[in-house]
Every structure is written in structure tokens, then in C-alpha cells.
Amino acid sequence: MTKADRDMSEWAKNPAYQRTVLNAKGAYTPPKNIIPPPPPKEPRNEHELEKQCGNYLNQHDIASLHMSYRAREKNGWPDRVFVINGEPIAVELKSKTGKLTDDQKAVLAQMDRNGWHVYVVRYFETFIGIVRWHLGISEEGGHLMREARWHP
């Protein structure tokens, strides 16, 4: 096995090694013929969607609160709450076929009346569009935001 083959093998199985491959000038250069990782897959359930959304907020340094349904004292509280540019945002995450409970409808209506931006999100792409819209990064998220906006 040549050094290049050994490097390629280490690269493929070890993410830490991937960050250490430097060229002669000290710049990062990935080995050739590496296939980039696939884009994030569409979540199969609400739990996977929650993890993707939480990771996305962390990557963009947005503090948020997620309370497990087991830990909630108030039934109907949304899955994620956070603030972007001084605007409070509440997001209820649902699977493609999930339905809001009566408690959730009541809490979301109350939050909406109190000035929160309230959304029911079923797709990760929609969540990204909403966050980017509120950050002022993209106007492309506007149609996604309007689609997910909750109305009592």
C-alpha cells in the first residue's frame, strides 16, 4: 500500500484525520477522488427533524430552548423557542402527517396574540427558510415562511 493509498484510507474512515491533511504551504487540501457527503436527508419523524433544527440553530449561534415532551410543565408548549433580531419565534415541529393537539392550538394562539412569530414546520428546508428570513440573509425563505405561518 502506497502512502497515498494509506492517506486515502485514513481520510475515508477518520474525520479527525480529514482536518489534518495539509499541503506544503499549510493549507487544507483534501485527497483527490473523495465524494462529498450527501445533503442532509429528509427526517423520518419529528425527533429527527428536531435534531436537525437544533443543530442548525447551534451552527448559526442562535440560542434556543427545546423541552422534551416529558419535561414540559405546560401542555402544548412549542418544540423550539428562540429569538432572532429581537423577535420571539415559536416553532412546533410535526411529521408529514402529524396533527396539532387542542393544547398546542391554544398555546400557539396565545403566543400569536402576544406578538410571537408562530410556525408549524414539517420539513427541514422550511425551517432553514424561516431562520434565514428572520436573519435577513435571504428573501427566498419568504414563501416557506408564509406556508408554515400558523393561523388560529
Image: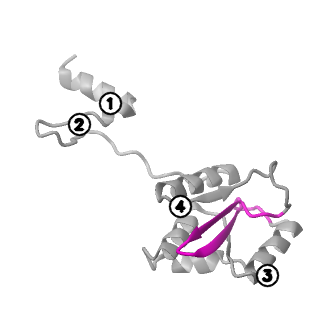
Residue placed under numbered mark 1 in the picture? 17
Precedes in sequence: disc 3 or disc 2: 2
Please tell me in which quadrant of the rendered image residue 30 appears.
top left
Real-space CA distance between mark 3 and mark 1, rounded to the nearest whole angstrom: 51 Å
Residue placed under numbered mark 4 in the picture? 62
Residue 98 is inside the magenta segment: yes
**Foreground tag (1 vs 2):** 1
**Foreground tag (3 vs 4):** 4
Indicate the amino acid at tag 2: Pro
Indicate the amino acid at tag 4: Ile
Task: Please provide the residue range marked out in magenta.
Answer: 76-99
Precedes in sequence: disc 3 or disc 1: 1
Residue 124 percent coordinates (x, y) = 57, 61
Mark 4 crowdedness (10 Å alpha carbons): few <14, some 14-19, many ≥20: some
Real-space CA distance between mark 3 and mark 2, rounded to the nearest whole angstrom: 54 Å
Residue 40 percent coordinates (x, y) = 50, 51
Precedes in sequence: disc 1 or disc 2: 1
Mark 3 crowdedness (10 Å alpha carbons): few <14, some 14-19, many ≥20: few
Q: Is residue 42 left or right of residue 139?
A: right
Real-space CA distance between mark 4 and mark 2, rounded to the nearest whole angstrom: 34 Å
Q: Secondary structure at mark 1?
A: helix
Mark 1 crowdedness (10 Å alpha carbons): few <14, some 14-19, many ≥20: few
Indicate the amino acid at tag 3: Pro
Real-space CA distance between mark 1 and mark 2, rounded to the nearest whole angstrom: 11 Å
Residue placed under numbered mark 2 in the picture? 31
- 30 shown above or below 138: above
